[in-house]
Image (spheres, grey):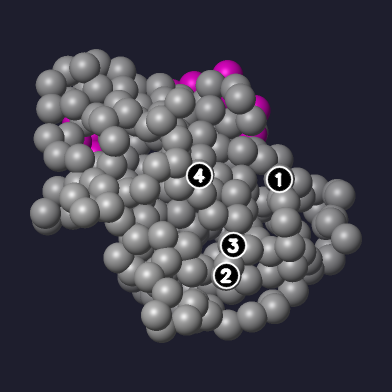
Amino acid sequence: MLCAAAACACDPTVIIGTRVCQQAPDDAGPGQSGDGSVPLPWSTGFENGFCDYAPPVGFCYEGGGGSYSLVTSPVHSGRYAAAFSVNAAIDGGSQARCVLQGVFPTAAYYSAWYYVPAPAVVVNGGNWNLFHFQGGSDLHGLWDMSLSSPNDGGLYAFVRDYVTFAASNSTAAPPIPIGRWFHFEVYVKRANDATGEISLLQDGVPAGQLTGLATDNTDVGQWYVGNLTSTNAIMPPVSTVYVDDVTITTM
């Protein structure tokens, strides 16, 4: 049963399985096409555990005391979702994420449903990151979709561009809800000139946009979904977020 209240005291986590993909050794999984491109449309609802992220199309990992697991509650659809837990009190930061990798389309929509069970505050100018994009043979940082805490105490999503070091600013979307599922969708138009675009929708409401950007000069990259905090970035320091129904589409 889902917790309805913002300050819900119950713990909805129910660990139901191993973090290791249970795919048979002779099953290649979704894989990539011959040119290394990500199969589109691509989606996972974690009904196969983490097998949709199996190599070569991706992988899941944890570091700095972070962990990831399957849960039966809360779920957005189907039977399962993924839980990603971090501890910002650990030096060097903490993370637990799943990564999709390969050749991405010139323009696409990257989306996932998130559930944040308890309030938290981003402090010390820290980074609480939910989406991350890297690119190129050196896998340099491209874009983040992270959370910030203005003076009203809410948690707001925004986009940061590491190519031009611009950050989106929008008050159109409300703070993310606590204790219920909500949807993030990031539209990325890749370009090596000033025709690129990155925009964020939260439950269909514009939450940030950057246009006229030279976003990147390569289509090869990685998309990270999960939970990451820099050191001492959030209070309280221990955080679990739940993710379900992750998709990439071109329309």
**Mark 2 lies on residue:** 49
Q: Nearer the viewer, residue 124 or 115?
A: 115
Picture coordinates of residue 195 (x, y %)?
21, 17
Give, as a single range, the part of the protein colored magenta: 162-175
Asked which secondary structure carries label 4, the reply is: strand
Picture residue at 84% right of the left edge, 63% below the top? 9
Task: Tell me if residue 57 comes above or below residue 90 in the rendering.
Answer: above
Does the magenta-highlighted stretch encompass residue 83? no
Disc 3: which residue: 46
Q: Residue at x 54, y 72 (%)?
A: 68
Residue type marked 4: Thr
Amino acid type, callout 1:
Trp
Q: In the structure shown, which secondary structural element does the residue marked by tag 1 occupy?
A: strand
Q: Secondary structure at mark 3?
A: loop
Which tag, 2 or 4, sits closer to the chain's start?
Answer: 2
Q: CA distance from mark 1 to mark 2?
A: 20 Å
Say if 65 sits above or below 136 in the image.
below
Tell me the amino acid under the disc marked 3.
Answer: Phe
- Mark 4, residue position: 247
